[in-house]
Amino acid sequence: MESNNVDYKQIITEIIKKQIVILGPQIAILKARGVEGLKVSDEGEVISVEGPGQIILQKLIDEYVLLSGEIVKNAVNSIFEKYPSIKKH
């Protein structure tokens, strides 16, 4: 995978943890585990990202946006500011 695999694991973990606060742990983790190539612990920590990080990241965001729309977009945008090397679609 890309050299910024660690960044993807960190940003995806942050997104999941923010969604745990918004949606609750069961729904947030269940949705994350539904993304192919993403392995997540019961606490919302990313265990592994298998495949293109950017695609997995986008699929995760899409899952959460389907549930709660603009709330997710706003939460995710603030996290992306911390990771300038990662581009959002």
Image (tube, grey):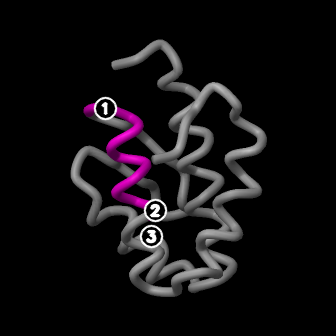
Assign a secondary structure to mark 3: helix
Closest to the camera, between mark 3 and mark 1, is 1
Dot 2, crowdedness within 10 Å: few (<14), some or many (≥20)?
many
The amino acid type of the residue labelled 1 equals: Pro
Residue name at image x 55 percent, y 36 percent: 87
The amino acid type of the residue labelled 3 equals: Ile
Residue name at image x 40 percent, y 60 percent: 60
Is residue 29 one of those drawn in magenta?
no
Which residue is most to the left? 36
Q: To which residue does mark 2 refer? A: 61
Residue name at image x 54 percent, y 60 percent: 44
Where residue 62 appears, as percent x and y from the top left, is: 39, 66
The amino acid type of the residue labelled 2 equals: Ile
Label for residue 35?
none
Q: To which residue does mark 1 refer? A: 52
Dot 1, crowdedness within 10 Å: few (<14), some or many (≥20)?
few
Q: CA distance from mark 3 to mark 2?
A: 13 Å
- 3 or 1: tag closer to the N-terminus: 3
Assign a secondary structure to mark 1: loop
Where residue 59 appears, as percent x and y from the top left, is: 34, 57
Q: CA distance from mark 3 to mark 1?
A: 20 Å
Q: CA distance from mark 2 to mark 1?
A: 15 Å
- Is 6 left or right of 36, judged from the image as shown? right
- Is 71 left or right of 36, judged from the image as shown? right
